[in-house]
Image: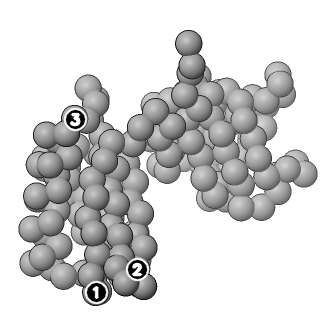
Amino acid sequence: MTGNELANLLEPTIERLGFELVDLELRLGGKGGLVRLFIDKPDGIDLDDCEKASLAVGALLDVEDPVPGNYTLEVSSPGLDRKLTKAAHFRRFRGETVKVRMRFPVEGRRRFRGTLVSSDEESIVVEVDGEPHSLPLGTIDTARLVPVVE
């Protein structure tokens, strides 16, 4: 089972609890695997939320058994440097500073750090040193918020 397939299986359970599945990491093999979920809600996530999600997801994984072998289940908040993985994430964090790594060079570079100016279902625009760069969503390797340090 791929990470996307597992996310599709778990997302309805997470949403019924009132949370958003922000990201999922799936590492299999070796002595033990890892299923790590990052959840969020508008007013933030606390330890009780993580425990509630862990119990519900653990029960679902026990019944469905989609992950082969032994693994550890972890549930966490996305943190201040959260990943942006969906078009909705980019819309929500417009105006924030982001760090983006592309799979392939765009305009001769693969890394962009600047202000997230706009986004739609196809691409985002990141302004770096006053210059806008249009980046196709489908070729973004990773995108993260850059925490503001005061």
Tell me which label, 1 or 3, sits earlier in the chain.
3
Q: What residue type is labelled 3?
A: Asp
Q: What residue type is labelled 1?
A: Gly
Quarter containing the C terminus: top right
Q: Do the residues labelled 2 and 1 touch (CB within 8 Å)?
A: yes
Q: In which quarter of the image is residue 33?
A: bottom left
User: How would you rate the neighbour count of disc 1 (Cα within 10 Å): few for under 14, some for 14-19, many for 20 or more?
Assistant: few
Residue 18's place in the image compared with 67, above or below, is above
Where residue 3 appears, as percent x and y from the top left, is 40, 70
Q: Which residue is drawn at 57% across and 19% down?
A: 149
Q: Nearer the viewer, residue 101 or 124?
A: 101
Q: How far apart are marks 1 and 3 (CA)?
A: 30 Å
The residue pinned by badge 3 equals 46
Residue 49's place in the image compared with 32, above or below, is above
The residue pinned by badge 1 equals 69
- Dot 1: element: loop
Where residue 104 appears, as percent x and y from the top left, is 77, 61
- Dot 2: element: loop
- Dot 3: element: loop
Q: Which of 23 and 28 is in front in this view?
A: 28
Where residue 96 appears, as percent x and y from the top left, is 57, 25
Q: In which quarter of the image is residue 65?
A: bottom left
Q: Is residue 12 left or right of residue 143?
A: left
Q: Is residue 33 visible?
A: yes
Tell me which label, 3 or 2, sits earlier in the chain.
2
Residue at the far right: name it: 108
Q: Which residue is drawn at 56% across and 42% down?
A: 144
Q: Can residue 5 be seen in this view?
A: no
The residue pinned by badge 2 equals 28
